[in-house]
Image (cartoon, rainbow, N blue to C red):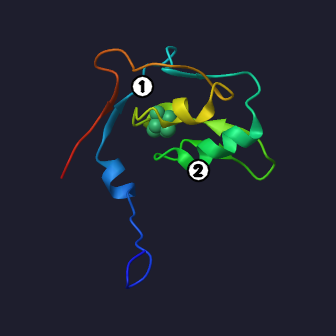
Amino acid sequence: MTALGPITVNIDGYLAQNRYEVDEGNPHIELVDRPDPERFGDLVRACPAALYKVDEEGAQHADFAGCLECGTCRIVSSDLVVKSWRFPAATMGVEFRFG
Ligand code: SF4
């Protein structure tokens, strides 16, 4: 919040510049079988790439193709959602591009 009001930043354009190499069949993030709904909701709010979602029926969805490899979900979930987390293999994952 500033003296002029809240600051809103749209990062979609910045994220769209990145390049992702998805390691099909070898995910770098694995979830527990039945994630805790409250902790999952925390990840919906915390993931900067908005990769955790809950639909209108309450079903949980996670797609890691656009993962920024920040590790926030690993820290926030306290093992109640994320079962394992590691960096993708060399040449896989996100390649950050600027400007
Ligand atoms: S590592 Fe970061 S960007 Fe990737 S899924 Fe977790 S919170 Fe989202």
Expressed as whole percent of the image width and height from the top left, the position of residue 58 reads 79, 46
Residue kind at label 2, given as amino acid type: Arg
The residue to which callout 2 is attached is: 45
Q: Is the residue 43 above or below the residue 86 in the image? A: below
Q: Quick one: quadrant of the N terminus?
A: bottom left
Residue kind at label 1, given as amino acid type: Val
Question: Of tags 2 and 1, which is closer to the observer?
Answer: 2
Q: CA distance from mark 2 to mark 1?
A: 23 Å
Q: Is the residue 55 above or below the residue 69 in the image? A: below
Using a 10 Å C-alpha cutoff, classify the residue at mark 1 as few (fewer than 14 neighbours), some (14 to 19) or many (20 or more): some
Whichever of labels 2 and 1 marks the residue nearer the N terminus, that label is 1
Please tell me which residue lies in front, 24 or 11: 11
Q: Is the residue 10 above or below the residue 98 in the image? A: below
User: Residue reaching furthest bottom?
Assistant: 4
Please tell me which residue lies in front, 69 or 38: 38
Please tell me in which quadrant of the rendered image residue 41 appears: top right
Expressed as whole percent of the image width and height from the top left, the position of residue 33 reads 74, 21
User: Residue reaching furthest right?
Assistant: 57
Q: In the rendered view, does 50 fall on the left or right side of 20?
A: right
Expressed as whole percent of the image width and height from the top left, the position of residue 3 reads 38, 84
Q: Is the residue 19 above or below the residue 31 in the image? A: below
Residue shown at the point (44%, 35%) measured from the top left? 67
Expressed as whole percent of the image width and height from the top left, the position of residue 98 reads 20, 47
* Ligand 1 within 8 angstroms of badge 2 C-beta: no
Residue shown at the point (43%, 82%) measured from the top left? 5
| Residue 84 - label | none
| Residue 22 - label | 1
Number of marks drawn: 2
Please tell me in which quadrant of the rendered image residue 87 appears: top left
**What element does badge 1 sit on?**
loop
Residue shown at the point (39%, 56%) measured from the top left? 12
